[in-house]
Amino acid sequence: MRRLAMLTHNPLGNFSFLAAPGRPYSGGVVTDAGFDLVHGSFATPIPLEAGLAAAVRHLATTGRPAQCLAGLELRIPEPLTADDFGKFNARYVASLRGLGLELGGLIPIGRTNVAAVVGAVTEPCLFAFSYATSSSQSKRGFLVSGVAEAEPGDPSAMLGSIMDALSTRLKELGVAWDDVTSIQLYGTETVQALIVDEVLSRTGKAGVRGIRWFPSNPPVVGLRLEIDVQSAGTELVITP
């Protein structure tokens, strides 16, 4: 049986993350006690580097450091080949390093990266971001990076593999489905008839919130579905 991943603490960001050495993002994030997540989406996706700068400026207005960035939601024009995906990730990691967001050779920030079908973009953009902030609530905020299917196949099997991976990561973060406030599905498959049976039936109380569906494709050619989840106490729409 696979051993649970160890959490790595990001003291400046006030959260811990599922470290993924050599990868451009972490598997997920959970805030320290006394902290929650704020989820902010831009009114319009902003080109990647300018979007990161806008996110950091927003944090400055709240008195929070750039290191409290816990999650980024990207949009790219179309799915990439494996080689092009590697090149994109190199650019992405360089941008994060330039902002001082690397910790001991690891990228603490979680990530979802999809090619939107509706509201498509012409270059890589930042659509939304999550960050840790102090909170008087007892619950902690968390997020899980986007998970695509283990391998293409029957939609039911693909969704099953995604849900298994999400459930494992939630356990690794020390949280549960009942604590989730947002479930986001990315895909263009005809999966609506499967959503209740394969996804919402396994999410406990979180299922009452429904699911956000973004007609999109995962970032690598050949993949078809992706889901991410999070718990954020505050939702914002930001106009830079």
Image (cartoon, grey):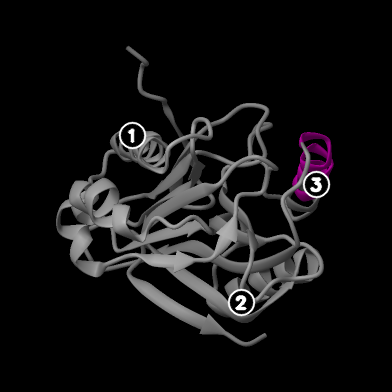
Q: Residue at x 42, y 60 (%)?
A: 184
Q: Which residues are magenta?
A: 82-93
The residue beneath circle 2 is 58
- Note whether 240 is above or below 166 in the view shown: below
The number of numbered badges drawn on the structure is 3
Q: Residues within 10 Å of mark 3 (few under 14, many from 20)?
A: some
- Proximity of marks 3 and 1: CB atoms separated by less than 8 Å: no
**Residue at which label 1 appears:** 164
Asked if disc 3 and disc 2 are in contact, CB closer than 8 Å, the reply is no
Residue beneath the point at 32% across and 69% down: 233
In the displayed structure, 80 sits above or below 71; it is above
Q: How far from the left and from the top, in percent, is residue 210?
A: 27, 67
Q: Type of residue at label 2?
A: His
Q: Position of residue 212 (x, y in %)?
A: 40, 67
- CA–CA distance between discs 3 and 2? 25 Å
Q: Residue furthest top?
A: 1
Q: Earlier in the sequence, mark 3 or mark 2?
A: 2
The disc placed on residue 88 is 3
Examine the rendering and report whether any part of residue 170 can be seen: yes
Quadrant showing the C terminus: bottom right
In the orientation shown, which residue stands out farthest toward the left? Answer: 205
**Is residue 89 in the magenta section?**
yes
Residue type of the residue flagged with mark 1: Asp
Nearer mark to the viewer, of 3 and 1:
1
Instruction: Answer whether labels 2 and 1 touch (C-beta < 8 Å).
Output: no
Of labels 2 and 1, earlier in sequence is: 2
> Could you say which is closer to the camera, residue 66 or residue 189?
189
Q: Nearer the viewer, residue 159 or 170?
A: 159
| Quadrant of the drawing holding the N terminus | top left
Residue 34 seen in render: no
Hey, what amino acid is under mark 3?
Phe
